[in-house]
Amino acid sequence: MSGIGTSVLTERVNLFNELVGEVRKRHLNPEDKYEVAAIIESLGWNDNMAADVFGADDVFALAADVWEALQTRPLLVPAVHVKKMNFFKYLGIIISSFLRGTIFAFPMAVSVFFMLTLRFSLWSYLYLSLEYATSIALGTILSFMAVGGFTQAIARRGFLYIGQGHYYMARKVTFYFLKIGYPVCIIAAFAFLLFNAAFTVFPWRMALVAVLYFLFLCSIWLSVTIMYMLRKELVFTGLIIAGIMVVFVLFKLLGLNIILSQLIAMTLVSIAGIAVALYFFLREERRMEKGIKPLMPRFSIIFYTCIPYFIYGFLYFTFFFIDRLVAWSTNSLYMPYLIWFRGQYELGLDFSLIALILPIGLVEVFVSEIMTRLEIDQKIYKSTDAGHMGRAYVRSYVKRIFCLALFSLANAAALYLVMKRAGGSFSLGIFSNNTTHFVFIWSVISYAVVAVALMNTLLLFCLSQPGMACKSALYAIIVNMFLGFLLSRWVDYSWAVLGLFAGSLVFALFTARRVMQVLNDLDYYLYTAA
Amino acid sequence: MLYSELGNQILNIVRYGFSFLIVFVLWPRILFPGREEDRLNAIVSRYVKMACLTMAAGYFLVSIKLYELFSLVAVLLLISAYSLSRRGQKNGSGFKDIWPGFVALVYDFFDGLVNPLILAGGFFKKKFYSVKGFVCSGFGTFAAAGNSLLLISVFLYSAYLRFYDAVVHAAPAMSDAYVTLAWMKYIERRILFHDGIYPQGFHIYLTVLRKFAFTDPLYVLKYTGPLDGLFITLGLYFAVSRLTGRVTPGIVSAFIFGVLPGFLPCEWQRQASTNSQEFALVFLLPAWYYAACYFDSQKKSHFWAAAAAFAVIGWTHPLIFVFLYIGLFFLIAANFTFNLKESAGPAKNIILAAGGAGVLAVLPAAPGLLMGRSFHSSSADYLTWQVKVNFPEITAIDVLALGGLLLFFITSLVFKKHKRQIITAFFVLLLGLSSFAMYMTLGPLTGKAVLAARTGIMWSLLAAVGIGAGWFALCGIVPGGVKKQTAEVILCIAAVVCATVLLKPASAQPYKMQRDSMVEQYLRISSDFRPTEWMMVSAEEGYALALGRGWHTMLGDFLSWYDPAREKLVRLVDGRENILTTPDIFIFKEKNLFRVEEDSIKTIMQPVLERRAEEYRLLDQWLEKYEASHDNVSVYYEDEDIQVIRIHQPKSSEEKFREIWEGGG
């Protein structure tokens, strides 16, 4: 009797172990006993079978036993042996990352080239009156700030879908953001005009020019984002060149007013930008494998997931422009209007922006390298070695950040020397004017520091920590604005650039601290990012 | 658009009103969220506190050279954030508590669960019903409707009397207005005590309004004076109606000061001008009222409102500050007389607040003195100026007011009212009698012009209070209920109508220092030409107008500095030639010399007018020579009295390029 009993018991134990194994095959790490019950049912078990074979009341009772067993048995996953990357492949990734990082500056480089040769570009002209220069500068700054959030949100969500091969969804979500972005820009423009109608902060001629440039530039930035997302930066550069050619024809050959010429050209560029983007989307969709089109998530979900990126986009552009607003609002003696364009300051900042191009390329290289390696290391490192892995990444990060900082500073110094040697019309009097020279030096250094901050930010984004980047950007803006305000009012308006420098330092230091925090607890943050 | 055109006035009044609404009505709701007894009390209390806060912030920011719209808004935002977070800690209605609800609303919007238009509609519907309820409560009974209509009429008429000049005439009223305008602009340029040490609180207040109104400072100057006069009237209504607990006596007091100011010894034409003294008066009655309330209630809200009013007065006008102290002395005396035991604590706090306000009042002067500035000479001279003064005649209003004050006190004793009412009546009596005595005797006995001219102001306020209090006492003697209230209102309407018809109060017509057309031309130039790109060449009055917008040169200086025969307008400065490159120069010439119609300054102005006549003669010669060798002169404006000549020197495109990219910021 006892022998029969023992053998039945052994059989039951074996069957039970088999069942546990089957469940684990289906799901390595079920959430709870209810998920286990669902798996058991999907394996063909029902209440009667559970009672007959294991004497359990029902499937749920059996699932509870299996769940208990799963908790006591260690989960052993074989290590994945990932092949080390081929050197040339690795080099290829590095070069393509670098080019991709620097290519973003092509439209800017093209604009600068035409400014130096033709004295105008798509939305700027060297011989404008101060009023119109103020209006256009204001329109430009506001356009960046207004669409900054949308561009980040579009890029984030769009990249996500494109990465998964869902061009249809990428197009849907992109145009959804455009559908919100355009009305927001138009509402902002109306609000500005309404406010100006009530208070006449600027004369109408200035306010209207500011609003028109604002609207058209918003439209252009939105189409830039789509091109960037679709990796068609060169196409956009082509559109910019075409736009400048339109301005050339209208302004130089047909003798139209420069502002009108630029507005017409910007209209054409933005329409063409959207049309080309739509064409690329549809082309990619046609190439896609046909199947079930997934439904779009609820808009509140899209909003929830995109809002940190949206906020960051706004803060990022605000950080880049706030020192200009601080400097231009300084009341030297008589302040014609609330904000007053100062070319000497703008010139210094414009040329120093070149200092960002190469470091951004390097940022792209470092970040893509770290993330590629991380993808592999996650599978190689044992869970018990998580701390070790974190420390290794901290060391690796510190090395790269030092490397980037040195490279950025060397690049800044090189730019300064090249500009100084070039002289003449190329440097547009940067070195002959004390204010421009002062702004140029400090902004070049600031942008070198910003490059470090941007690498940190990109890492935080890759590790799904946009909130950390937002907070750092916010602190940087506060420091930039506060210090710039004090110095510009107490010393000279051009000292607002020291606000930019201090803000850049804060941005770099705070983001670095956050990256270290994430890398030190890498396993936790990778788990939460998954 | 001409200054007095309806469209221009509506536009600028709307801007001014919007600025006032934002800074002194809406923003204080966030900053000072405490609940007051009633709506008017809340508005007055918050206005007083906000005026104090903006002055403190203004003084601080000007002294550290950071005063401008952005810094002011930043300071106010920081204080608002602090106030909201404190409120959140106290009663769970702070930012942190509101935020989750807002976020949920946004998500619901994205999911199409809520319609913002419907939400907004619901909000406005709720507000509409709230306003409707408020209006209906004011017209619920015959007496209430009568009182409401009477109150509105009194205020509308008071506004007409004060605003008429400000709306019709572009020229600033009285010579003081130019000083106020210039000082206001100096504050905007972060300069304290430019012409000597003098309280600058009022000028800071004006700049705060201007910063949010984005209008020409002239409009702020023109509207603020009349509005102050109206606010003093409102303060009288507020204090008397609250102290007596009835609306009609408040209306009577408001009527006396608001509609019949010409019959009070208060130089009422000044109310159509803009002066710091009248501004300080706005806060005098609320200061006494809140101090009296504090003795009664010992509530913190009353104490802080009183303390804020003390500080505002201290920062604004020394004489009104003395009046404040006199009032506080009698308030404490009245409380000690009838309620010594319970008054010691509040008296100590009120004395501390008044002392603190005194310290705060002189505090801004300290850096001025350290910088070597002396006290404002004209004001200092006025304090010591001796004149022959006759004893004022006693008028019917004086008699009525004195009678009213006595009756108010006697009835409070006879009818054995509450101790608090007896103290109030005694305080008002002491203050009224002392101010009357000062008005009657101080000027003639001391021979001081300042005392002779200004002690009447305090008595004017107290006379209005006295008549209102007397009305209250008289009505209190007559027994009755609802019918008595109806009869009281009918009687009050009849009295107000009769007095208005018989006395025919006319709008204020303060004297001017220049023609309206000159100011209108300044406004036209200021709106048509970019600031800093034009220069006004005119007599002294043009300086305050052009300051902060364009450049200004005195006509005499212009004629002596620039040789009309030379190609460019060149001036020798320290042996170097300085070319005048301002693109547009406007020379203001009077074809018929404007003569000031004010006896007190006619003699002072006589040599000035003679000098101007000579300058205009020389100007004709200068222009003749200039036109002979230049073709850039034109007549910008001309009428039968004035001519504005424009010299246009456009910038070349190379100059414009250099201006943008190489300097001129």
Image (cartoon, coloured by chain):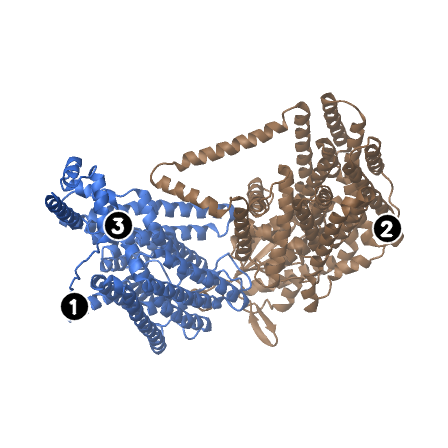
User: Which residue lies under the disc numbered 3?
Assistant: A274
> Residue type at mark 3?
Ile
Crowdedness near tag 1: few (<14), some (14–19) or many (≥20) residues, C-alpha within 10 Å: few
Between A15 and A239, which is closer to the camera in this rendering?
Answer: A15
SS class, disc 2: helix
Q: CA distance from mark 1 to mark 2?
A: 102 Å
SS class, disc 3: helix
Chain ID, mark 1: A
**Who's brown, chain-wise?**
B
Q: Do the dots labelled 3 and 2 sit on one chain? A: no
SS class, disc 1: loop
Between A317 and B409, which is closer to the camera in this rendering?
Answer: B409
**Residue B45 percent location from the top left of the image:** 64, 44
Residue A139 quadrant: bottom left
Which part of the image, by quadrant, shows the N terminus of chain A? top left
Task: Please identify which colour was used for chain A in the image.
Answer: blue
Residue drawn at x 63%, y 25% is B140
The answer to whether residue B56 shows anywhere in this view is yes
Chain ID, mark 2: B
Chain ID, mark 3: A
Q: CA distance from mark 3 to mark 2?
A: 83 Å
User: Which residue lies under the disc numbered 2?
Assistant: B442
| Residue A84 disc label | 1
**Residue B396 percent location from the top left of the image:** 84, 36
> Residue type at mark 1?
Lys
Which part of the image, by quadrant, shows the C terminus of chain A? bottom left
